[in-house]
Amino acid sequence: MSLPCGIRNHSYAQDMAIVRTRTQWGMMLGFLVLLFTAPLYLSSYWLGVFNFIGISIIAATGLNILTGFCGQLSIGHAGFIAVGAYTSGILTTRFELPFLVGLICAGLMAGLIGIIFGLPSIRVKGFYLAITTIAAQFIIMWVIQQWDWTGGQLGMTVPFASIGGYAFRSGQSQFYLIFVITVLCVFLAKNLVRTRVGRAFIAIRDNDLAAEVMGVNLTYYKLLAFFIGCFLAGIAGSLFAHWNISLTPEQFSFKDSILYVGIIIIGGLGTSVGPILGVLFIRLLKEVLTIYLVPFLENTLTMLPSGFASGVTPMLFGLVIVLFLILEPRGIAHRWNLFKASYRLWPFSY
Amino acid sequence: MKTNKLIISVIVCLILVIASLPYITGCGADREGKTIKLGISTPSTGVAAEKGRPLEHGQKDAIAYVNAELGGVDGYQIEIVWRDNGYDAAQMSNIVRNFMDEGCVMFSTSSSAMMTASMGLANEYGFAGLAAFSSPNLYRPPQHIYGQLPDYGDDFLAFMDYYLDEIWQGSGQPKVAIHALNNSTGKGAINAARAFADEMGITILWDGAEGKAFEHKADTISEMESLTRINALNPDVLYISSTPAPTALIVKNARELNMDVVIASGHAGFTSKLVELAEEDANNVYGVFPTASWGDDVPGMAKLMEYCEANHPEDAGNGDYITGWAQSLIMMKIVETAIKNVGYDALATGDENAWAYLENEGIKKLVNYDVNGLHGPVSYTVSDNRLSKSVRVFQVQNGVIVALTDWIEAPVVQYENFDWFGQ
C-alpha cells in the first residue's frame, strides 16, 4: 500500500497496519466521533435512513467477500438476508430467545443455507453459478411464503432488539446497535481479505486453475466464501427484522438481490471500502430523489399534471447509475483511491 | 435627540400596529398559517402504479379542494406529506418514520401490502394508519390500523352471496377457483373462502392443500399454466383478487383458453383500468366495488369530477380516483372531529399524544359520516376497524361498469378466532 510522502515502514507490523500515520489515526477517530454523534444532529427520519444504510453495508460487505474477492457471482443475496431475518424473527417470537442468540443463529443459518446453494460453485462458475443463486432466491422466498411459522405471505411482527433487558426502540439506540455491529463486520471483512483465507479467495477469483495448482482447496474456500458472505447477509437480515419489526416476503425481492450486485459494482468490486461507498451512493441517491427532487419538481413545474414527477424518479435513478458505470466503471472506490493518492503525494507532484 | 425619540416612537407604534393586526382583522385570523399534517403514501411508481397514480391524484385533489374552497378543516389548512412507496415493502417503515418525524397526526396507504409492511411500527407507536384497500390481517385483532372500506374478504363474501342468489342455477355446490395475488390482497379472499365455504355451500378448488389458492405475482406476464390447471378442475367461478394489470391479464388468458366460467374480481382489480387493459375480454366480468360509480348522482360527485377534469383528465371514470378522494375526505373528517373534541393545539404537536388524541377523539368518534355519498357511510364500531362497511356488485357490460345491486352490508368477521388465521 502506498504511503504519504516522507513515511516509510520499519517493521512488518507497521507494513501490515491498517491505520499507520498520526493523520490517519486522527481522521479515523474523527470519523468515528462524527459517526457516533450523528444521532445528536440527525432527525429520526434520517436516522432511519442511516440505520438502513448500516444494515445494507453489512449485507453488501458479505456479497463483496463472495463476489468481489472470491469471484463467485451471487444474485440471490436478498434471499439469504431473508433467511437471517426470519430465523431471528422466529427464534425471538416463537421460542422467545434473546436477540443476541437470534442474531448469531441468523448468521449461522444463512451461512449454512449459503453453503447448500453454494455447492454448485464446485462445478460451475460465472453466469451458470449466477443462475443457481437466482434459484436460491426463488426457492428461499417460496419456502418463506408457504411456511406457517413465517406467517406466509402476510409476514410476521418481530419485537425490537433488546440486550440485557434494554430494548432498542428509539432510532438513536437502534443507530448505535446497528453501527457498532456494522463497524465490527467491516473490520472483520477488511482483515479477512488480508489473511491466508482472503488471499485464497483472491487467487480463486483471479484464476481458479492456477490457485488449485498452487494448493488452494477450491471446494473448501468457495464454500467458505459462501458461508462468510451469507453469514453477514444473515446478520444484516436479523438487524433488519428487529429494526423494521414487520417482516413480509416482499421486503426481500429479486430486485433487491440485483440492487446489491449493483451496489458493489458501483462501490468498487473487491475493495473493502467499495460496499460502504456503494450503499451510501445508492441509498442516498434514492432518498434525495424521493424526498427533495420529486416535491421540488411538483412545486416548480406546476403547468405539468400533478404526479408527473413520481415517474421521473426511477428514470433518473437508472440514468445516474448508467452514467456512473460509463464514466467510472471501476467504482467509487477507485475515485476515492485517486483522491487519497493525490493527498499522499502532496506537496510533491511526482 | 428629539429626532431619535420621534423615530423610536414611530417604530414602537408600528410594532404595536403590526402585532395587533391579527386581532383587528377579525375572527379566524388566529388560525392563519396554522396547519395539520397528514402523511400520504401511494404506489405511484412500480408494479401497482396503475392504481397508485389515480389514488394519489384523488387524495391530493380532495385536500386541495378543501383547503382552497372550504378554507381548510375548521379553518386550519391541511398540509400533505406525500411519499411514493413504489410498491416497495422495504421502503415503508422508513416512510412511516418520516411521517412521524414530520409531525403528521395520522397516515394513509393505498394498498394493504404496503400497510402490512408498515403496521408493526404504526402499532408499536400508536400512530394511526388508514388503508384504502385492506385485508383482514391489518386489523384482526384490531389495533391502530383502520380500513377505509370493507376488505378483500368482504368482497368475496358479497360476490358469492350475489352469485348464489342471482346466477347459480346448477345442482349441488358451485366450484370456485380463486386466483390470488401473492400478498395480503390475495390472502383476504382466501381467508374468507376458507372461513365460510362450508357455511355458504360452495366448494373451493384449492391448489393442493386447503388454504392454498392459485397464485400469481404483481408483475406476472402469463397465467396460461395456472389457468389450464384450473380449467381441468371444471370450475363454475373464477374469482380474482388482485390489482388491475394482473387481473386484466388473467381475464385475457382465461378468454384465450375459452374457459366456461363466471369471472369475478375483488375491488383492488375492478376499475376502469381493468376495462381499458382487458378491452372486450372484460365484458361480462363481475366485480365488487365499495364506492359510487363515476358520474353517479351523489352530492360529492360534481366537485370531484370538476377537479379531476381540471387536474387529471386521464383519471376520468377511474374508481380509484374516487377512492383516493374519499380517503382524504375521511382523514379530514377525522381531523375535524378531533379538533372539535380536543382542540387544535392538542393535535398540532404531531407527537405521540397527538396521535392518541386523534385516534380516540377523532377516529373512534366517527358516526355516520356520509363521505358526500361517494361510498357507504363511515362509522367507528367497537372491535371493527373497518370504517365503511358496504359494497356493491357490478358488471362490465359493453365496456361500461354497471351497478347490479344497491349497497350490501358486509358484517364483521372475527378471523382471529380461526386457528389458521395469520399463518
Image: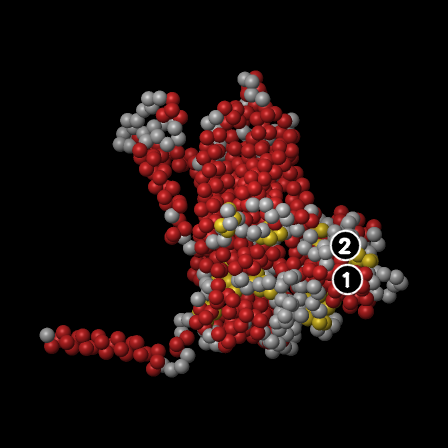
Left or right, A7 with respect to A240, comes to left
Q: Quadrant of residue B169?
A: bottom right
Label 2: which secondary element: helix
Judging depth in this view, the residue of B335 and A111 nearest the camera is A111
Q: Residue at x 55, y 25 (%)?
A: A204
> Residue A155 placed where, x, y %?
63, 51
Left or right, B214 with respect to A185, comes to right
Subunit of label 1: B
Judged from this view, the residue extending furthest toward the right is: B171
Q: Residue at x 38, y 22 (%)?
A: A12
Q: In this view, does B339 lie above or below B156?
A: below
Left or right, B166 with respect to B141, comes to right
Disc 1 to disc 2, how far (Cα)? 26 Å
Judged from this view, the residue extending furthest toward the front is: A164
Q: Residue at x 77, y 64 (%)?
A: B160
> Residue B259 placed where, x, y %?
81, 55
Earlier-in-chain disc, 1 versus 2: 1
Labels 1 and 2 positioned on one and the same chain: yes
Q: Which of the image's four quarters has the N terminus of chain A? A: top left
Q: What residue does disc 2 label?
A: B254
Q: Identify which amino acid the numbered label 2 is placed on.
A: Ala
Q: What residue does disc 1 label?
A: B196
Number of other residues with Cα within 10 Å of mark 1, as a class: few under 14, some 14 to 19, many 20 or more: few
